[in-house]
Image (cartoon, helix red, strand yellow):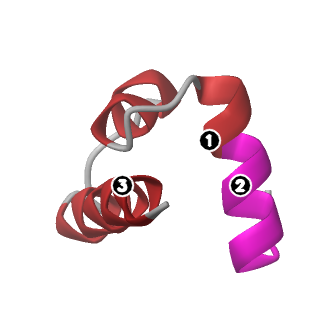
Amino acid sequence: MQGWIDGFQRSIEYIEQNLTETLDIEEIAARAALSSFYYQRIFGALCGMT
């Protein structure tokens, strides 16, 4: 269970470190070891944003 949480945290850190760059959902999802589909679902559920 902890693995996906760690991966999601890594992806959030990546987003924060690259806010001035163009972000690619595939690259962000890969940092969380998730498909872009599942990453978007989890991000929306946890952050309340899409």
Stretch of the chain drawn in magenta: 40-48
**Residue visible at 29% across and 71% down?**
16
- What amino acid is labelled 2 in the image? Ile
Which residue is tagged 2?
A: 42
Q: Position of residue 37 (x, y in %)?
A: 72, 27
Q: Position of residue 35 (x, y in %)?
A: 57, 23
Q: Residue furthest left?
A: 17
Q: Is residue 47 magenta?
A: yes
Q: Quadrant of the C terminus?
A: bottom right
Verify CB contact (< 8 Å) between mark 2 and mark 1. Answer: yes
- Direction front: furthest residue: 1
Identify the residue at horizontal 22%, vertical 57% (top origin): 18
Residue 29: x, y in percent? 45, 35
Q: Nearer the viewer, residue 50 or 5?
A: 5
Q: Secondary structure at mark 2?
A: helix
Left or right for 18, reference 27 = left
For the point 33% across and 60% down, which residue is it?
15
Identified by mark 1, the residue type is Tyr
| Residue to which mark 1 is pinned | 39
The image shows residue 8, relative to residue 47, as above or below, that is above
Residue 44 appears in which quarter of the rendering?
bottom right
**In whole angstroms, how far apart are the C-alphas of marks 3 and 2?**
14 Å
19 versus 30 height, above or below: below
Q: CA distance from mark 2 to mark 1?
A: 5 Å
Asked which secondary structure carries label 1, the reply is helix
Task: Say if 35 sits above or below 31 in the image.
Answer: above
Q: Position of residue 36 (x, y in %)?
A: 60, 26
